[in-house]
Amino acid sequence: MSGLLVNPIFIAKFFSAYGGADRSLATVNPSITGISVACLQASAAVGALMAGRLGDIIGRKRCMRIGGFIYFVTAFMQMFAPGSNTFVAGRTLQGVGFP
């Protein structure tokens, strides 16, 4: 994620409404960059708590397949995101499939 946060094209596409219209990270609101990074970790913690119980119910292999599918689908969601809201939603859902 650190490579994307300094990329001028990424900044112009996703952070232009939050101060990044000049393609510089220096003018972007730091809360927005923090949210775009931390949303995956927060939802990964929730996913880790759910994965143990779900693995007991449906089996560990099936649980890993479901997590991999969620991670794969949300990666495409982020790749083709039209704006920052879709990008953050994709990262948040991706965290659930991470553990």
Image: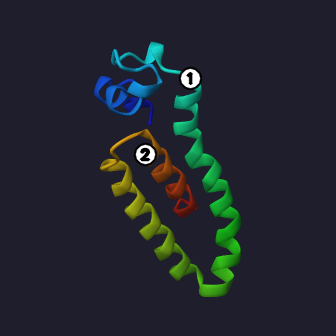
In the rendered view, tell whether residue 69 sits above or below residue 11: below
In the rendered view, tell whether residue 74 sits above or below residue 16: below
Amino acid, disc 2? Phe
In the rendered view, tell whether residue 47 sits above or below residue 84: below
Task: Give the residue at x 67% y 55%.
Answer: 45
Task: Give the residue at x 38% y 33%.
Answer: 14
Q: Nearer the viewer, residue 24 or 2?
A: 24
Residue 69 drawn at (x, y percent): 42, 70
Amino acid, disc 1? Pro
Per the image, the residue denoted by label 1 is: 30
Which mark, by number, is residue 87?
A: 2
Q: Secondary structure at mark 2?
A: helix
In the rendered view, tell whether residue 71 sits above or below residue 66: above
Q: Secondary structure at mark 1?
A: helix
Question: Which quarter of the rendered picture does the N terminus lie within?
Answer: top left
User: Gap between marks 1 and 2, in whole Å?
Assistant: 17 Å
Task: Give the residue at x 56% y 48%.
Answer: 40
Residue farthest toward the bottom in the current orientation of the protein: 58
Residue 13 shown left or right of residue 51 in the figure = left
Give the mark nearest the N terminus, 1 or 2: 1
The image quarter containing residue 53 is: bottom right
